[in-house]
Image (cartoon, rainbow, N blue to C red):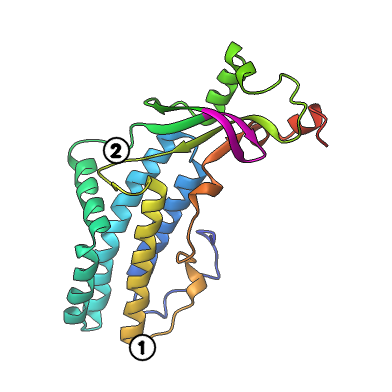
Amino acid sequence: MPSVDDPAIELRSCPLVLTHDRVFECHFQLHQMIAAYHHPAPFRYSANAFLASSKSVLEMVRLDMEKEGENAWRRERVGQVLADDLFTQFNTARNFVIHRGSLIRSSQVEFGMFSHRRLKLALATELKTDEPSHLLIDRIANSNSASMFVHPDRPFIGEQLGVRREYHEPLLSTDHDVLTACDMILRQLCTLVDDCHTHLEVPFDDDAHDCCTAHDREEHATLLETDIDPSLAEKWGWD
């Protein structure tokens, strides 16, 4: 993802200045979610911010396309977005956050033994606290139950304790986890912006926001002991 301060991002020559800025904001919030993935509270805060930014992209499209005299086309195309089931759920969730409180108050957690990044033996639970994954791993590693999963000296290369985490929120999506659903919404918005460019016959650098590339939850869902402390590999004689 490009830096927020990247001077190479130049949008002033494009008529969709407001839209691009808001899409970039959505992409930034998605990466904040990824960075905070194993910290439930910051993840939730960033997801709430993504909800607000994603809805306001449509308002920025309205303002930009009005200036180009393209309201009729804009209404029809935005109507397609609003009719999408996932976007409808996001709208409902956004209204809930504004008027009633936060979403994503729990996560599905699998903790136990991983071989490299592959789950081998674990217990699963719904965690209704904001306990970060690294503290959960530390608590397991220093408990009597650690021996259920791994040898204290970790003699087998790659075998270690870890946590795999998923966030599900039915108000956001009944079919997808939170990060995947947000990624799908972002790609919908990027497609909308692409269609605006095509309709206006204005070229646009696809790399400026780089938001059409899928953000794979599986790359971020697992946290291992060696992710927290890379020196453990040497301590256990794996190097």
Q: Which mark is residue 201?
A: 1
Relative depth, front residue between 126 and 37: 126
Does 72 appear above or below 79?
below
Q: Visible in this render: residue 15?
A: no
Q: Residues within 10 Å of mark 2 (few under 14, many from 20)?
A: some
Main secondary structure type of the part rendered in magenta: strand
Which element type, helix, strand or loop, lies under badge 1? loop
Q: CA distance from mark 1 to mark 2?
A: 40 Å
Relative depth, front residue between 130 and 156: 156
Q: Which residues are magenta?
A: 111-122
Look at 79% across and 27% down and name the residue there: 236
Q: Is residue 106 magenta?
A: no
Does 107 appear above or below 148?
below
Does 183 appear above or below 81?
above
Q: Is residue 115 magenta?
A: yes
Which element type, helix, strand or loop, lies under badge 2? loop
Name the residue beneath numbered marker 2.
Answer: 103
Q: Does the residue at mark 1 contact the one at mark 2 (Cβ under 8 Å)?
A: no
